[in-house]
Image (cartoon, rainbow, N blue to C red):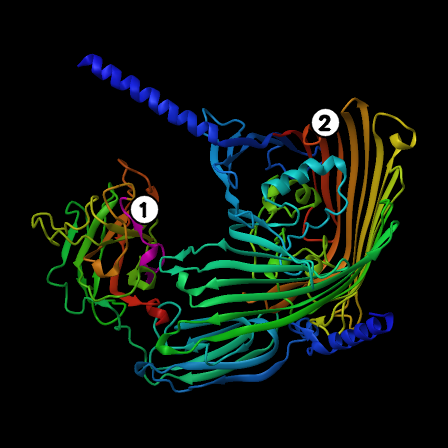
Amino acid sequence: MKRNLILLLIFFAVFLSAISLHAQINENIWFDGLSRSYFARDAVDKSTTDDTLSAKNTSNGYNLLDLNTHVNPIKDIEIFAQLRIRNSFGSFFGSGTEINVRQLKAKGVINNKIRFSVGDLFLKQSKFTLHNYDEELSGHENDMLKPYRDIIHYENFYTENRWHLQGIQTDFSFEFDRFIRSLGFDFFVTRPSGSSQINETTYSSDLLLSGGSMISEINKRLTLSGNYINLFEVASSGTKNISVRNPVHDMSLLHHFGNDKYRIEQKLQTGFSKRYWLYSELENGTSDSTSNDTQGMYFELDNKYIKKDSTLFLTLGYRYVDPNFRSAGAQTRRLDYAAGNSNTIYPIYTNMSLIRPPSLFDLVSDDRLYNRDLSSILMAFNPSYSNILPYGEATPNRNGIYLKAKINNKKKVFLSKINAGFFKEVIGQGAVEKRYFGLFKGSFKINFHRWLNWEKELSLSASSESELTRRDGKAVSSLNLFSHQMNASVNAELAKKFFIQASYKQFNANGNEFLTQRDNYGNITYFTSTQIDQKDHILSFGMLYKLRENVYANLNYNWWGMKFTDQPYLDYKYNRLILILSVEL
Amino acid sequence: MNIKTKLILFLGLVCFLHSCTKKEFEGPLIETLYGDFELIKPLKLTNKNPSFLSNEQVGFHCEFNKPVQWKIAILGLSTSATREITGFSNIIDSNMIVWNGGPSQVPFFSEEVCAIELTFENEIDTLRDTISIVSAKTYENGIWVENFEDGLPTNALVYYNTDGGGMTFSVANDDALLGNSYFKMGGRVNWDWNLGSLDLPLNITNASQASDDLYINIGILSDLQDLHTGQFINILISEETGTPFNDNPNNNASDLFESTMEVYKMKVPVDWNGWQLKSFRYSDFEPVSPNNQDINFNMNPSDISAIRISCQACPSSTGNPNCPENFGKDVRTDIDHIIFTANSSLLDQ
């Protein structure tokens, strides 16, 4: 009996191990991901005398590993899971260790024809329908502050101006041998936020975002594309009988031609939006109704001249965006100043325990100030940091021309960028007179090592960004606001892959503006007059050891602060020592 | 497409764009917001002789040129009862801004002449008017009322520390909040917190309101002479349904408030002088035993089976001198007019 039992066990052991082996042979599993060690020590500057309540210095940090597991159970299907293990420094026996699933996705191809993805998606359409615009003051970032910016983007899922959403997506295309050359389609349905409990008896509704794109190459020179997107709530999924609807239609025609030296692209893009709140499922059989209806359109003519030796990219265009154009997917901001997010570093300051207003350094370094959720109404912005295009190119109530240029020499010794624009409001805000806007951003980088044929890198980069807003008219409503950001940095490779870096960033804003207050339906209810006179600075010095492009160790020291003149805030100054070890697996 | 055609199309489009926006500006006019305050329409009352007993209301209407913080103050010239209504807008709409006869706090308005005053923050303008109340509002419309006018309810249970001095756990008729009678709760127990309690059975199984929409209102009289510190009333509400109200007839207290039962509480510090009417939303009550995993704390007003009003005060004797300043003082936390109301507090009804 005992012998039979042993034989049975051996049989099952061999049989099951064979099954397991069989499974492993057919499975294709591979890993990648990111590991980061982060340590920061913040200190109140020694010159600060009016803050004896805050800790003189604080330190914090963490280790994290984002392990991406890719499983291909069959050739055309991939299951992707991103598992995060994060351990805060100072936690005791794993009490500060978090393990969570950060992303989960299945994607594949059906019959080699239709691609699909289910789960975490990164979606982008046109710049007027679904586009996650860069945050303000990030246009010409120097290399020294890039690790901070990388963390902000990574932690908030900001990838290639795409929005991180959860849902289902599919795309497929056709090729033709007559009339048109190709036709491609892309559709998605996502749920930016689910129903949640507001109080004991009230639940908010599911917020959904659906859309589709069509692109057709009509001939070698002409491409036609169209996009549709709709942000809407499903009233029946909550207890509120009011739900938002925001459909946006977009169409563009791209024409290009050129020769072996240059290429010219002309793009005509237009579309329109609607936004309203629907009252449905009303009591006593009352029929559905709508409120706060707005309709708006936009138009853009974009002309690009591109030299094929990459020495010149020139863009010249005209853009009109109606005051009532509303597109949640394109106008949602990364930074929401009304969300009440407090700074991570010294949120309270001075002996009066004031809430510290965010500075340039907070915007550069604090990933918790940033937003990941789509908003159906225009979010608040700070005119000091971004007053001309706070909602990117989809900013409503703008009419004007713009110019972008990128000039390099062939050996890439000298690289420069220019971004300029002159806009005006389509209609005034709180006054018949319209605001006029002037924007000029320029940057250059000189690669001395290329110039002098050195093996080790030595480069100098600098940028200047200015925004001017002006409104004439009566003294009570006139305004004049000027802001300027200056940026300079030096990179010197002392030993192979070992760099010494220094940078200085300064931001000034001076003048007056009116802050716009909106109600829950986005209607302007009030203008708060505000005087602005502030100066931000960040001085950094440090070293970088760059093993590979995405594998580096960075140690640097930042002196930063903010100075106000005739403002209801007090000046502050802080210092920070930071170590980042980032390894992309 | 030649250049001419493109140019014509472009110009056509520009003309179209210039014609598509009709408004000249959006939002309120800054010139008005930051300009001088002006009255567009004077204060108008929709009813100058209201009969609040018949559920009549007084609506207020006024328009001005910019949004401002405004305040309507109503003063009863006989009772000195007051009511304040505030808001921030450029219009006071009589459909929205109404008064139904209740004060902001006791005393209540009676049949009297009331002075009305409309003022604006940072502006010198003051608009005045008067109304004459034909019949005053009554406060008996509730889901459940106990006003002690017929003495203690037959099933009520009163417990108090018999070793205390000057214990007053009984119905009195000398200084009621409403009507003639109220329940006195007070005395002197210098060595302990607990003085006594009143337990009342409740049956509101027909209440359909959610706990967010149910309000418990109670009139409380604090010290009239020596203001006492550290005295408060605990209101306990039981949703225990499987146990009789007076399961153990020997303890002078209801048996529906055990720590193993679904009981909610609200602690009310009593530190004012005279009567006040306090209102609490039922959903703001907290579980008495939140850590007891065997109890399902799921508020359901129709399950309310009993209410306990207990009087407690900070001990002051030398054996337990938490509040020595109260030594020799009598606690006074008398109650009157316990009423459950739906959707709003009693004074906002």
Quadrant hosting residue A302: bottom right
Seen as rendered, the residue at the extreme right is A452
Mark 1 burial class by Cα count in 10 Å: few <14, some 14-19, many 20+: many
Instruction: Identify the disc placed on residue A546.
Output: 2
Tell whether position B117 is magenta: no
The N terminus of chain B sits in image quarter: bottom right
The image shows a total of numbered marks equal to 2
Q: CA distance from mark 1 to mark 2?
A: 73 Å
Compared to residue A238, the image places residue A80 above or below, namely above
**Amino acid type, label 1:** Asn
**Amino acid type, label 2:** Lys
- In the rendered structure, the answer to whether residue B117 lies left or right of residue A534 reads left
Residue A10 percent across, percent down from the top left: 30, 17
Looking at the rendered image, the disc whose residue lies closer to the viewer, 1 or 2, is 2
Residue B151 percent across, percent down from the top left: 14, 66
Inspect this view and state whether residue B146 appears.
no
Q: Residue at x 84, y 45 (%)?
A: A310
Q: Between residues B265 and B313, which one lies in front from this camera angle?
A: B265
Q: Residue at x 66, y 66 (%)?
A: A527
Q: Which portion, as a residue range, is magenta?
A: B271-289
Compared to residue A173, the image places residue A249 above or below, namely below
- In the rendered structure, the answer to whether residue A455 lies left or right of residue B294 reads right
- Circle 2 SS class: strand
Mark 2 burial class by Cα count in 10 Å: few <14, some 14-19, many 20+: some
> According to the image, label 1 marks what residue?
B326
The answer to whether tags 1 and 2 share a subunit is no
Seen as rendered, the residue at the extreme front is A177
The C terminus of chain B sits in image quarter: bottom left
Q: Chain of mark 2?
A: A
Q: Chain of mark 1?
A: B
